[in-house]
Image (spheres, rainbow, N blue to C red):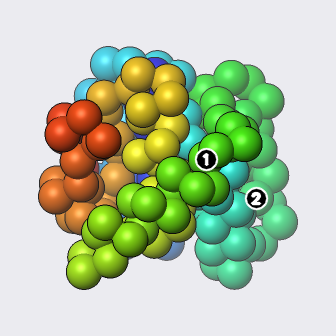
Amino acid sequence: MTLTDTGPLVAIINADDPNQVAVSALVNTIRSWPLATTEACLTEALYLIGKTAGTDGQEALWRFVEIGSLVIFTPSPRSPHRSREFMARYQDLPCDYADATLLVAAEDHGLRQVFTLDGHFYAYRLTNGMALEVIS
């Protein structure tokens, strides 16, 4: 499984996204399927896709979920607290809530790859000091 940030989810769906061609090419290089994301990233993606591609675009993203190509991790009871800790640790980058939830999901599920357009992930470290392998 490969964690996926908001940017690639939007670019996969929205043909007008400037990153669409590059993201589509990278999708073919991902070794660990399915893709996985958090509710925070899904919320952002659905909002952004809705603004640019409307409900048809949102439905396209939901189809990825339905066919099992995208898994949505639901937060554990401690996830908000742990996300807040990551946001505080990386406030100078900054680390937004969606990024922090991906870091928590990586720790909770033992995942080490993140598909993102966000350069901040090169600087983030998990609680144990490990970096994620960034696919971008």
136 above or below 17? above
- For label 1, the residue is 79
Q: Is residue 85 positioned above or below 111 on the image?
A: below
Q: Nearer the viewer, mark 2 or mark 1?
A: 1
Give the image quarter of residue 64.
top right
Relative side of 123 to 24, left or right: left
Residue sitting nearer the eye, 75 or 64 = 75
Q: Residue at x 76, y 59 (%)?
A: 58
Residue 35 lies left or right of residue 114; in this view the side is right
Q: What kind of element bears circle 1?
A: helix
Foreground residue, 18 or 43? 43
Residue picked out by circle 2: 58
- The x, y position of residue 21, in whole percent, is 33, 55
Q: Residues within 10 Å of mark 1 (few under 14, many from 20)?
A: some
Residue at image point 68% right, 23% down: 68
| Mark 2 in CB contact with mark 1 (< 8 angstroms) | no
Residue 10, image x, y percentages: 54, 61
Circle 2 residues within 10 Å: few <14, some 14–19, many ≥20: many
The residue located at (41%, 46%) in the rendering is 103
What is the count of numbered marks?
Answer: 2
Q: CA distance from mark 2 to mark 1?
A: 26 Å
Q: Position of residue 77 (x, y in %)?
A: 72, 42
- Depth check: 4 or 25 in front? 4
Q: Is residue 102 visible?
A: yes
Residue 84: x %, y % from top left: 51, 64
